[in-house]
Amino acid sequence: MGAGAPCPEACACRVGSAEPPADTCAVIVAGGSGERFGDPRGKQFVELAGLPLMCWSIAAFEQAPSVARLVVVCAPDRAAQVEKDVLARLSLKKPVALAPSGATRQDSVLSGLGAVPRDLEFVAVHDAARPLVEAEMIEAAIAAVRQDPALAGAILATRSVDTLKLVEGTTIVATPDRSFYWAAQTPQVFRRRVLLAAHKAAARDEYLGTDDASLVERMGGKVRVVESSRDNIKVTLPEDLALAEAALERRLLG
Ligand code: CTP
Ligand code: MG
């Protein structure tokens, strides 16, 4: 095969090559109302280092070689704004589809999964409100699942640094061993079919989880953590924006 010719999917020259297969669809959920943040524009649209906040996470997925395409989930009445103020400003090379958000984050993810093509083996679900995610972190989570056939998924997470207390009312009931506790982030990467089945089961059972991994866990799927950076915060409260801005500036200044 001559230099520059397209490489078939199962081509042996991939073996040992540095470039991973493009076998993953990103589902970036941006359909929340940002009540705790409190800005009428919606936190995903506020400016962060010169761009609408959600641009930064989309750009990270654009740069991750394993990601073949993107699904952005947003409120139907914000679709035109996402096209104009977000997607048009990024001039993405990868195909992007929009999907309508639902009443809860979980509904939004399920909606996004409906726009994921069946020929992609993995799905990386990400909160648009985590603008500090980086392509290397995304790749690490995808690689973890790809490498281990026993895994249903892998999520980015950080070790708990604080001592944790189990509290009833205001009374401490227990001080669990902190070394067993991690704080979950996104992206959370899964085999597409496993995540879809877990979401459908949760909808059927009216089970509402706080992340995607919990839906897969309750179906018996094995999910591992991949240690992440504490910088990968979710912008939730107004003061988080300044933290995100400072971390981005540190990164951009090298
Ligand atoms: N999200 C979504 N659809 C929903 C709710 C949330 O797509 N119905 C998205 C948010 O846009 C965000 C991510 O899920 O990127 C994480 O949710 P969260 O931080 O809770 O954002 P909001 O729900 O917008 O904020 P709040 O809970 O303060 O209203
Ligand atoms: Mg919310």
Image (tube, helix red, strand yellow):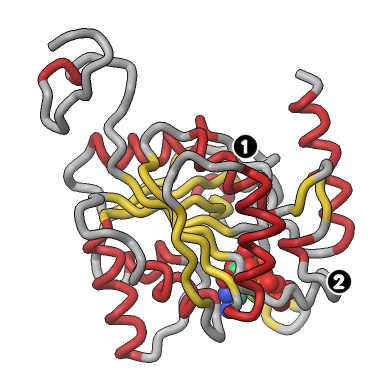
Q: Is 81 in front, or is 165?
A: 81
How crowded pointer 2 is (Cα within 10 Å; few <14, some 14-19, many 20+) is rated as some
Instruction: Tell me if 17 is positioned left or right of 45 in this view.
Output: left
Residue at position x 58%, y 48% in the image: 58
Asked whether the viewer can see residue 173, the reply is no
Residue at position x 54%, y 45% in the image: 179
Asked whether the viewer can see residue 193, the reply is yes
Disc 2/disc 1 C-alpha distance (Å): 27 Å
**Mark 2 lies on residue:** 39
Residue 83 x, y percent position in the rendering: 61, 61
Q: Please tell me in which quarter of the rendered image ligand 2 is found.
A: bottom right
Q: Is 42 in front, or is 150?
A: 42
Instruction: Tell me if 113 is positioned left or right of 137 in this view.
Output: left
Q: Amino acid at mark 2?
A: Asp
Image quarter (top left, top right, bottom left or bottom right) of the N terminus: top left
Residue at position x 76%, y 18% in the image: 254
Residue 87 x, y percent position in the rendering: 61, 53
Residue 102 x, y percent position in the rendering: 52, 82
Image marks 2 and 1: residues in contact by CB distance under 8 Å: no
Q: Amino acid at mark 1?
A: Ser
Q: Quadrant of residue 117?
A: bottom left
Please tell me whether mark 1 sits on a helix, a strand or a loop. Answer: loop
Residue 93 x, y percent position in the rendering: 48, 39
Checking the image for residue 229, the label placed there is 1
In the picture shown, does residue 207 fall above or below 225?
Answer: below
Q: Is 221 in front, or is 71?
A: 71
Q: Nearer the viewer, mark 2 or mark 1?
A: 2
The tag earlier along the polypeptide, 2 or 1, is: 2
Residue at position x 34%, y 71% in the image: 114
